[in-house]
Image: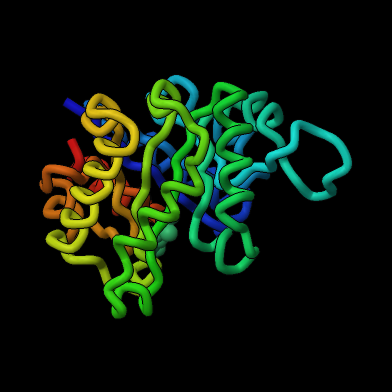
Amino acid sequence: MRTPVVAANWKMNKDLSEAKSLVSALLADYKKANTEVYIAPPFVFLNEAQQHIKDSGIQLAAQNMNAAASGAHTGEISSSMLKSVGASTVILGHSERRDIYGETDAQINEKVKTALAADMQVIFCFGEQLEERKASTHFEVVKSQLASGLAGVDAEAYASIILAYEPVWAIGTGETASPEQAQEMHAFIREYLRTEVSAKVADQTRILYGGSVKPANAADLFSRPDIDGGLIGGASLQADDFLAIVNAAS
Ligand code: 13P
C-alpha cells in the first residue's frame, strides 16, 4: 500500500505577510491523516515557514536547487542550505524550469544525483507538451524524460524519489487531463519502472499527477489505481482549496 502524497508548489507567489497568513490558515484546519503533505514556498520563506510547520506533520520542500555543493554561483541555492533550514525534499525538473530557464535533462539529472547524495528526497517532474500529445508521442517523451533525468539512479535510491507527471498543457490552464488520460499515463510509468528498474520499485514508488488539480476533480483523479496524489499549483495558494485536495487523497 503506497502512502498518498499531496504537495503544494507555490511557485513565485506571495510576499512574507501573505506567506505567513497562508501557513497560519493551513495549520488552523489541517488534520494529520494518512497522506504525506508538503508545502514548497519560495526560497526566501522556507526558514520562516519551517518555524511554523515543524510540529504539524506538514513537511517543507524547495522548488529548485543547484547541482553544485557551494561556491561561485551567484543567486543559486545548494542542497546543504536547504537542509539547514529544514527542507529535505526538493522539486526538480518542473516544466517551468525546463521551458523558461532552459534546464536540460542532463542538468536535471545532475541535480537529482546531488540531492540523492545529500540524502534529500526528490519530487521529479516531467510531462509532455500539447503538440507532443497531439502527435501521440507523449508516451515516448515521458519515457525519454524518465530515462535521462533519472539516469544512473539505482533501485535503492528510488525510495527517495516521488514522481510527478505534469502534462504541460494542463498546467495553470484549467484544462485537466481526464482521470482516464492521467491513469493511462500513470500505468505506463509504473510499467516502465517495472521493466527498467524493478517490480518492487514499480509497486512502491508514488506517482503524483499535476496540472489544474482542484477540489472538484481531485477525488476522481486520486481514486485511480496508479495515481498516488497530486502536485498542486494554483489551488495550493488558498488554504481551504489545498486542504480539500489533501482530504480527497486520504
Ligand atoms: P496548476 O495546479 O496551477 O495547474 O500547476 C500545476 C503545477 O505546475 C504544480 O507543480
Tally the marks. Answer: 0
Q: Residue at x 75, y 31 (%)?
A: 69
Camera-nearest residue between 15 and 97: 97
Question: In the rendering, at what x and y percent does residue 35 appear?
Answer: 26, 31
The quarter of the displayed image where residue 162 is located? top left
**Where does ligand 1 appear, by image quarter?**
bottom left
Camera-nearest residue between 43 and 153: 153
The quarter of the displayed image where residue 88 is located? top right
Question: In the rendering, at what x and y percent does residue 224 appear?
Answer: 12, 48
Against 97, residue 75 (above or below) is above
Please state, as top left, top right, bottom left or bottom right, where the C terminus lies in the image. Answer: top left
Q: Residue at x 41, y 37 (%)?
A: 38
Which residue sits furthest front? 195
In the shown orientation, is residue 72 left or right of residue 174?
right
Q: Residue at x 61, y 41 (%)?
A: 111
Please state, as top left, top right, bottom left or bottom right, where the N terminus lies in the image. Answer: top left
Against 111, residue 154 (above or below) is above
Q: Residue at x 36, y 57 (%)?
A: 142
